[in-house]
Amino acid sequence: MDPERLIRAFDRKAARSLAWVSGLFSLTVALGLVCDALGRRPMLHFDSPILLEGRAALRADPNQEALIERIRAEDQVLREEFFLSRDRLLLGGYLLFGGLLVFALSLRRMVFLSEGLPVPVSPEDLVPHPKETRLALISALSLAAPTALVVFAAFALNREQGELAAVGGSSEQVLLANAPPPAPPVPEELKWPEFRGPNGIGIAPPTELPQSWNTDTGENILWKAQIPLPGNSSPILWGDRLFLTCADLSARKVLCLDPKTGAVRWTCALITPGLSMEEIEEKKEATLAAPTPVTDGKRVYAYFGTNELAAVDFEGHQAWSKWFGAPDNNYGVSSSLRLHENLILLQLDQGGGPEDGKSRLYGIDAATGNVVWEVKREVSASWSSPILISSPTRSELLTAAKPWVISYDPKTGKELWRAKVLQGEVAPLPVHADGLAYTVTEYAQLTAIRVGGEGDVTNTHVAWTFDQELPDVASPVTDGRFLILPNSAGKVRCLDAKTGKVLWTQRFKSTFWSSPTLVGDRVYLTDNEGKTTVFKMAETYEQVAQSDLGEPVITSIAIADSRIYVRGKEHLFCIGAKP
């Protein structure tokens, strides 16, 4: 036999054998993938019976450490199952693609070797033979099939990854995938949605409030409720719901109470994947629940001294949570949250100094908990909170920390202006009125800054300064005419807000950490012993009333529906006129 024919016959036989082997291999892999797909349930993470039952049990009794650990273990198992399934799908896709590719090439080689030498044909014979058409179709399908299967695998994988992202990754947990429904309308007098009230500057809408009360006789005390865990956050309100946070190393809780009766509607104990409590140190003075939450009428957003941020709906279900890592702050975390449109604004200043590069400002999507923007801040650790300023031309987010007062665009985090006017450990919040922003810290200075500038305005926009016996914790309050400054030494000063001139000074026997609240022309100011003094916002000091709550207070009051809500060391009090 002709050697060339022998070689051609051998090649044809080898190609046929390889086609059979690769075809059977591909068929086996394809059947395996189909069986795996039919037997594998979708990644509906929180439909796990253990998780569903566990969440229900935790809502009933949040202090179940064993149950929390069981939920975390189930969470870990489900996530490992997802990644194992994903890896199996990818490997199967690659094997199937390779097997079908070898099958197609072997088949084409076998067909080629089976053909004889070409012979001349007439134009009439240039019509594809059915066998040739069939072989071409088989070759095309054998090449298209692996491509289609790989595309299908990628689609399935992306869908499952999307489902996993919807319920959270290593640093984020989303329990409810959809954004909350629109908030029902609530009258403004029933809202106190954030720290220091609307706009965060300690001014309440004018309303009739009790000017005195007595816990011994019950005068104007409508109710008081025991707080289960420590905390220095202040209460917030929205309609028929009052929110409060409390925490220790065992649990971080958001409480919802009925503002009319003090009855607890629900308690939500946070579950945050990735949180390492071994890295958390509890600061007894600040507690782990010093930041005040904020609400948009759909959810309440709470931030804790563990650096946990969470969203909880109005029925007590945790929507999502994030952990920003172990805090680096000598006195604990106390910055309260703000809301601007759909963004939660978090001022996270930490580290030993600006050179540490640890301070950040975040804009976080309230619906999902995803970080929309993040800005690095060249400042030291602070205990202040940002405030929002609105003007006809723009909105500004004003922050204070050594050494800068910095204004940002709350939508994008873009810096608008800054002034180098701060020193020391900054805790008081800025306030603003009539185009002036006021920042202050003890052993440094009080500065009035004209807002609306651009760039570094240290030398161009400072209206006046004052540097005598300033607050170290309590924040000021101003109506644009007068500026009230309480300090830890028990002194309260009133300055002319336009010029900085001292109008009067009043001495008390206690310390002021609570910030004053202005209602109409009257200021409510509570000292650390729980005594609240009511005085007029005027050029001369005139005391209206003084009442003792009988319990230490370092939080700020909330006002809604002609009632005052005060958090003491152990109880939450509701003060109002009795029928």
Image (cartoon, rainbow, N blue to C red):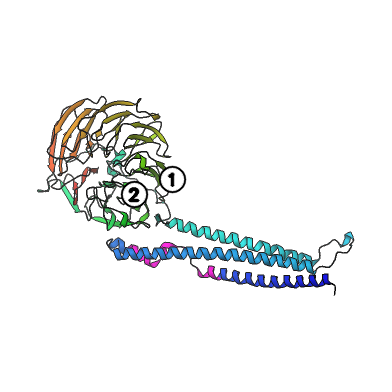
- Left or right: residue 115 versus residue 445 is right
Seen as rendered, the residue at the extreme front is 3
Task: Locate residue 203, reporting x and y percent.
Answer: 26, 37
Can the viewer see residue 269? no
Q: Earlier in the sequence, mark 1 or mark 2?
A: 2
Residue beneath the point at 85% across and 61% down:
126
Comparing labels 1 and 2, the label whose residue is closer to the camera:
1
Cα gap from disc 1 to disc 2, whole angstroms = 16 Å
Q: Tell me the quarter of the picture where residue 65 sits.
A: bottom left
Give the structural element (helix, strand or loop) at label 2: strand
Task: Locate residue 448, reporting x and y percent.
Answer: 29, 29
- In front here: 170 or 132? 170
- In front here: 266 or 500? 500
Task: Locate residue 273, reporting x and y percent.
Answer: 37, 58
- Callout 1, which amino acid? Val
Q: Tell me the quarter of the picture where residue 441 sits.
A: top left
Q: Which residues are magenta?
A: 35-56
- Which residue corresponds to mark 1? 372
Q: Residues within 10 Å of mark 2 (few under 14, many from 20)?
A: many
Q: Residues within 10 Å of mark 1 (few under 14, many from 20)?
A: some
- In front here: 577 or 317? 317
Q: Tell me the quarter of the picture where residue 555 sits.
A: top left
Main SS of the magenta part reads helix
Task: Locate residue 279, reporting x and y percent.
Answer: 32, 54
Mark sitting on residue 301: 2
Give the structural element (helix, strand or loop) at label 1: strand
Can the viewer see residue 77? yes
Report the number of numbered marks: 2
- Callout 2, which amino acid? Tyr
Q: Is residue 52 magenta?
A: yes
Q: Is residue 477 magenta?
A: no
Residue beneath the point at 82% across and 69% down:
4
